[in-house]
Image (cartoon, helix red, strand yellow):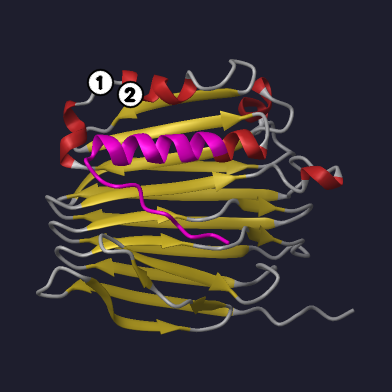
């Protein structure tokens, strides 16, 4: 059987603020497999759904995303369905993301969960640039696989690189490469046989004064054999928060509780991603 042709998708978005305070898409461009759904302004934030029009990502696919949130604009960037990484035949899926947030702007990156399936190979590279006075809430997640089908950590390789800069200063850098073939999954498997992972990065000037106890409020809603949560203060302007959960439902509940808590602490009304 011949290999399927790989796709090279490109998604570019610029969101700006009108004089009346509303946020709108001022520039857009995209190519398969990515598509921009109809946007929705709820009176406080612009909901933007990025849709993959195919069954997921396959070996050799390259997806590039560039999002700029101009001064004063308020954006919730989400997706209505999970990101599925299919068996790759040895070829790697590459996801490249770049987010730029100007002074006075807010960006909430809230995608559905990433699911690498058996023998999938994928890498994700993310760059986040924040100007002074800008705010970002960025989420990345990882499922162990199609657990309901008996798969758990059977992907070939999943790697990600994340850099966050505030006022051009590097305040967060993460490098991780996971594979069932080299022992790199030991940490995930230590607590739960099929751990579900979420990492959330917050960059917001107001959060510098917070105490780490804010994260315990989320952990207290679950039993110790269901979830583990940790928060680390960034060198400037924010926090890095990690969650390990025993299953997908517990992870989803913890992410929801954490988002609600962070929005409340920031003095914002929780934005509904309208995932139907």
Res. 104 in view: yes
Which range of residues does the magenta coloring cover?
253-276
In the displayed structure, 69 sits above or below 121; it is: below
Look at mark 1 in the image and give the residue it sits on.
211
Return the x and y of residue 260 as percentages of the image width and height: 38, 39
Out of 196 and 165, give the one closest to the viewer.
196
**Residue at position x 56%, y 49% in the image:** 159
Look at mark 2 in the image and give the residue it sits on.
214
> Would you say residue 70 sits in the magenta stretch?
no
Return the x and y of residue 211 as percentages of the image width and height: 25, 20
Out of 144 and 7, give the one closest to the viewer.
144
On the rendered structure, is 247 left or right of 220? right
Query: Considering the numbered disc 1 on the image, is that residue within a helix, a strand or a loop?
Result: loop
Return the x and y of residue 95 as percentages of the image width and height: 52, 63
Neighbour tally class for label 2: few under 14, some 14-19, many 20 plus, Cα within 10 Å: some
Return the x and y of residue 1 as percentages of the image width and height: 90, 79
In the displayed orientation, state which residue is furthest to the top: 224
On the rendered structure, is 175 left or right of 5? left
Contact between marks 1 and 2 (CB within 8 A): the answer is yes
Query: Considering the numbered disc 2 on the image, is that residue within a helix, a strand or a loop?
Result: helix
In the displayed structure, 267 sits above or below 39; it is: above
In the displayed structure, 167 sits above or below 17; it is: above
């Amino acid at each position: 059987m011949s290999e399927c042709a790989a796709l090279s998708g490109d998604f570019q978005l610029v969101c700006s603020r009108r004089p009346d305070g509303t946020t709108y898409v001022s520039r857009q461009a995209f190519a398969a497999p990515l598509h921009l759904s109809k946007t929705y302004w709820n009176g406080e934030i612009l909901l933007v759904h990025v849709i993959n029009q195919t069954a997921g990502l396959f070996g050799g696919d390259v997806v590039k995303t560039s999002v700029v949130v101009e001064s004063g604009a308020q954006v919730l960037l989400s997706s209505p369905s999970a990101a599925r990484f299919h068996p790759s035949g040895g070829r790697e899926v590459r996801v490249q993301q770049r987010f730029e947030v100007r002074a006075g702007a807010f960006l909430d990156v809230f995608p559905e969960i990433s699911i690498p399936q058996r023998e999938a190979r994928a890498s994700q590279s993310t760059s986040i640039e924040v100007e002074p006075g800008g705010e970002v809430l960025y989420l990345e997640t990882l499922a162990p696989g199609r657990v309901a089908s008996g798969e758990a950590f059977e992907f070939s390789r999943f790697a990600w690189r994340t850099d966050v800069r505030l006022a051009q200063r590097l305040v967060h850098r993460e490098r991780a490469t996971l594979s069932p073939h080299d022992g790199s999954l030991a940490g995930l498997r230590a607590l739960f046989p099929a751990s579900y992972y979420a990492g959330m990065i917050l960059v917001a000037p107001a959060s510098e004064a917070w105490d780490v106890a804010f994260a315990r409020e989320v952990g207290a809603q679950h039993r110790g054999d269901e979830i583990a949560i940790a928060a680390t203060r960034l060198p400037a302007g924010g926090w890095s928060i990690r969650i390990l959960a025993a299953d997908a439902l517990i992870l989803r509940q913890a992410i929801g509780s954490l988002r609600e808590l962070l929005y409340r602490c920031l003095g914002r009304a929780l934005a509904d991603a309208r995932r139907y």
